[in-house]
Amino acid sequence: MFGLSDSPRPSRRLWLLGIPTTLAWAAAGWSGALGLLDPFRLMSLNRVDAWGADAGPAVSLVLFFSVAVTVASSLGFAMLWGVGMSLSGLGLGFRASSLTTSLGVALGSGIAIPSWTRPESVGRRLPFLDGKAEPWSDVDWVVYYEPYLVPAVSAVVALVMIVVLLRAFLREAEADDRAEALRHRGRQVSGQVVQVEFTNVWVMGNPRFVVHVRYPTETGERTVVATMVTPLFQAPSRGSSVVVRYDPQDPESVLVEPERSAFPGPLFG
């Protein structure tokens, strides 16, 4: 069953933005690993002066990290707009942006592995003044393997996002195929909005509604429930007309689209 929808297929712009976004996050992952995580790791383990005399390169990397994160975040927001303002498009853009983030951080932090600073003492903290060296705790060992854990965890997240995106692409393609089949071979009738519910959800500043649409069939009137997102001044109301396409052989296969005369602006669902 389909609702009011205007969701486009993944656009070329989304893929083109994905490449520089991934590279920007890779730069952020590399500089963040060496400029932030490496000094804090040393201070946590046994070098309290990790930001001392040798902190010059680390400070430069922090500045580079700030620029890289700013660029990567801006490109990531651009990806949210790459598929359009539909709910499915926003979800797809968010998942694609999350993939570029995790993949970029995995690549950047992975490249940084050979450049992490080795602690001066492994397994024990350096003694303070005349005190005794204390053995590392379990947390210290986790921090010690941080150069490998950061890219590994990011890579796992990236793999999960790849699977999620593939499933989303397949579902989107299947839904688009069914919608196209109904547009070409479905029976078209005029439906009427009989109930409107505001969901208290806003998408890109536009309200989302659940509408109940009544339409005639050979066996009598039926009602379909659909979602739609419209500009506030084009919000649906009871009595509005919509176009309904349905398959007489499959009552659950229904496509609801706006009548341009009733809704002059673009609708997204």
Image (tube, helix red, strand yellow):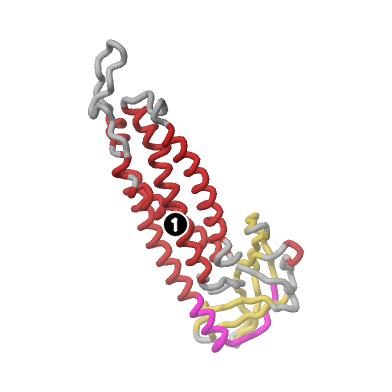
What is the quadrant of residue 78 in the picture? bottom right
How many numbered circles are shown?
Answer: 1
Q: Is 250 inside the magenta-drawn segment?
A: no
Q: Residue at x 41, y 28 (%)?
A: 51
Please provide percent x and percent y for residue 112. 34, 45
Quadrant housing residue 126: top left
* Mark 1 crowd level (few <14, some 14–19, many ≥20, 10 Å Cα): many
Queried whether the magenta region covers residue 177, the answer comes back as yes
Image coordinates for residue 229, horizontal then vertical, percent:
65, 65
| Magenta residues (range) | 176-193
Identify the residue shown where x is 74% and y is 74%.
264
Taking 166 as reference, is 255 left or right? Answer: right
The C terminus lies in which quarter of the figure?
Answer: bottom right
Q: Position of residue 237 (x, y in %)?
A: 74, 68
| In-front residue for pair 129/81 | 129
Instruction: From the top left corner, tell me how far across and down residue 105 is, in percent.
Output: 40, 50
Towards the viewer: 262 or 138: 138
| SS category of the residue bearing label 1 | helix
Q: Residue at x 51, y 58 (%)?
A: 94
178 sits to left or right of 29: right
Which residue position holds label 1?
A: 22
Decide: is 33 above or below 50.
below
9, above or below 74, in the image: below
Query: Tag 1: residue type?
Result: Thr
Instruction: Identify whether 126 is placed above or below 29.
Output: above
Give the image quarter of residue 228.
bottom right
